[in-house]
């Protein structure tokens, strides 16, 4: 993985939020999603992917866990193993939470710690170095 990529913050939010384009893969099944928008959350303990996208690539659960939201709500969730791609950057075999309730992809610290990121708040850009 080489290169430098710049992406605009997602302006659908006020204030705009850092986001990255991702593609979700299931290499075993030969399936992938189209390019999707993923929110960058440096405080999240788990990457959340709506179950709709996981079903699309025929990902299967590998474990169960409990998720506690920042509001204190606790619920049982299924964990899935998928491959992610951010432009030319491949992130194989990452474990994600299948989100039955949410509509957004949220990238957590485990994913973000694999990347070199620069958040330029005033310019509303995120820069990824591969």
Image (cartoon, helix red, strand yellow):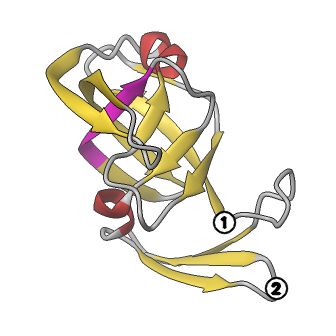
Q: Which residue is mark 1?
A: 18
Rendered position, 50 above or below 10: above
Earlier sequence position, callout 1 versus callout 2: 1
Q: Residues within 10 Å of mark 2 (few under 14, many from 20)?
A: few
Dominant secondary structure, magenta? strand
The residue range painted magenta reads: 92-99
Quick one: SS at disc 1?
A: loop
- Image location of residue 86, percent across then percent down: 51, 54
Residue 79 placed where, x, y %?
24, 27
Q: Which residue is mark 2?
A: 123
Quarter holding residue 43: bottom left
Q: Position of residue 102 (x, y in %)?
A: 57, 28
Number of marks: 2
The question of residue 93 being in magenta is answered with yes
Question: Which quadrant holds the C terminus?
Answer: bottom left
**Which quadrant of the figure has residue 109?**
bottom left
| Mark identifier at residue 9 | none
Find numbered disc 2 in the image and state the secondary structure of the residue it sits on.
Answer: loop
Q: Would you call the spot at circle 1 few (<14 residues within 10 Å), some (14-19), or many (20 or more)?
A: many
Do the CB atoms of the residues marked 1 and 2 lie less than 8 Å apart? Answer: no
On whether residue 74 falls in the magenta region, the answer is no
- Image location of residue 108, percent across then percent down: 39, 56
Residue at coordinates 39% horizontally, 45% vertically from top-left?
A: 47
- Is 21 placed above or below 9 here? above
Taking 78 as reference, is 119 left or right? right
């Amino acid at each position: 993985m080489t290169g430098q990529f710049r992406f605009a913050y997602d302006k659908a939010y006020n204030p705009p939020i850092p986001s990255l384009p991702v593609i979700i893969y299931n290499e075993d099944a030969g399936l992938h999603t189209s390019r999707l928008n993923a929110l960058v959350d440096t405080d999240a303990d788990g990457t959340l992917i709506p179950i709709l996208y996981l079903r699309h690539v025929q990902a299967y659960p590998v474990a169960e866990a409990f998720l506690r939201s920042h509001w204190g709500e606790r619920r049982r969730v299924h964990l899935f193993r998928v491959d992610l791609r951010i432009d030319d950057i491949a992130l194989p075999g990452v474990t994600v939470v299948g989100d039955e309730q949410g509509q957004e992809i949220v990238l957590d610290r485990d994913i973000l710690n694999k990347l070199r990121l620069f958040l330029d708040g005033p310019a509303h850009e995120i820069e990824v170095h591969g």
